[in-house]
Amino acid sequence: MLNLRHLLALLILVSVVVLTTVIYRHLQQQGPEEVLNMLPDDIDLALEDLHYTQNEDGQQSWTLDADQAEYQRDSSLAELEAVKLLFYGTGQFGDINLRADQGQLAQDTRQIDLWGNVVLNTERGEQLFTERLHYDDPLRQLRTADSFRFFSPQLELTGTGLQVDIDQGRMLVKENVWMLLHPAGREKK
């Protein structure tokens, strides 16, 4: 019985080695052009664990991380999955952390669109929740036309349509504004 198990294990091992060798030789016989032709036409580069840092005057401005990215050279667009965005030293807000299920980076214009469970956290303990958010790097503004919820130790705010000037610490709510003030700050739980 024990010899039959050893023989079966040996046959499986030999089969795996032969199959691996055949696949490896087949891929070696194909030139780089043939391998590239197997990729989808609309994707020039596919990456996992993307880490992108934008610098301004020698200082880190923001960092973008994504679990997966598909870059299209013709349009300078990168489609992103599981996005994390960190803004450094944003004035009153301090560092800002953003997370979203998906996103798109337009590298040439430095515009970032995020969607799907977008969550923003600031160093001051503020949180913003929405479904879509746009970042305009030249203007240093975050915008959404969607509804949102904003929480801080001093207030709760909801509305539709939001524009945030990151460097100046200003927020403009477009419509459907509801706000609850906590003058002494909310108690931490």
Image (cartoon, helix red, strand yellow):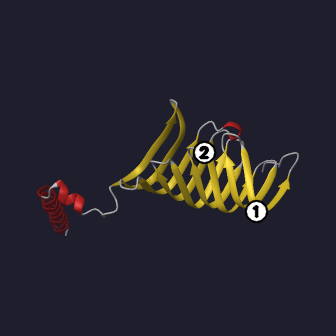
Does residue 5 appear to the left or right of 183 in the view shown? Answer: left
Q: In the current view of this chain or complex, which residue is farthest to the right?
A: 183
Mark 1 neighbour density, 10 Å: few (under 14) some (14–19) many (20 or more): few
Residue at 63% from the left image edge and 40% from the top image edge = 95
Q: Nearer the viewer, residue 115 or 21?
A: 115
- Residue 155 location in percent, x, y? 81, 52
Does residue 182 appear to the left or right of 150 in the view shown? Answer: right
| Amino acid type of the residue that numbered disc 1 sits on in the rendered structure | Glu
Residue 175 is labelled as 1
Do the residues under discs 2 and 1 have CB atoms within 8 angstroms? no
Does residue 113 appear to the left or right of 28 in the view shown? Answer: right
- Residue 103 location in percent, x, y? 51, 57
Counting labels gives 2
Residue at 79% from the left image edge and 61% from the top image edge = 177
Q: In the current view of this chain or complex, which residue is farthest to the top?
A: 58
Residue 98 versus residue 131 in the image, above or below:
above
Does residue 127 appear to the left or right of 70 in the view shown? Answer: right
Residue at 56% from the left image edge and 45% from the top image edge = 137
Q: Quadrant of residue 11?
A: bottom left
- Residue 187 location in percent, x, y? 83, 48
Q: Quadrant of the N terminus?
A: bottom left
- Residue 56 location in percent, x, y? 52, 34
Query: Is any part of residue 80 visible from this angle?
Result: yes
Mark 2 neighbour density, 10 Å: few (under 14) some (14–19) many (20 or more): few
Query: Is any part of residue 125 visible from this angle?
Result: no
Q: Secondary structure at mark 1?
A: strand
Q: CA distance from mark 2 to mark 1?
A: 22 Å
Residue 139 is labelled as 2
- Does label 2 or label 1 sit earlier along the sequence? 2
Q: Secondary structure at mark 2?
A: loop
| Amino acid type of the residue that numbered disc 2 sits on in the rendered structure | Leu
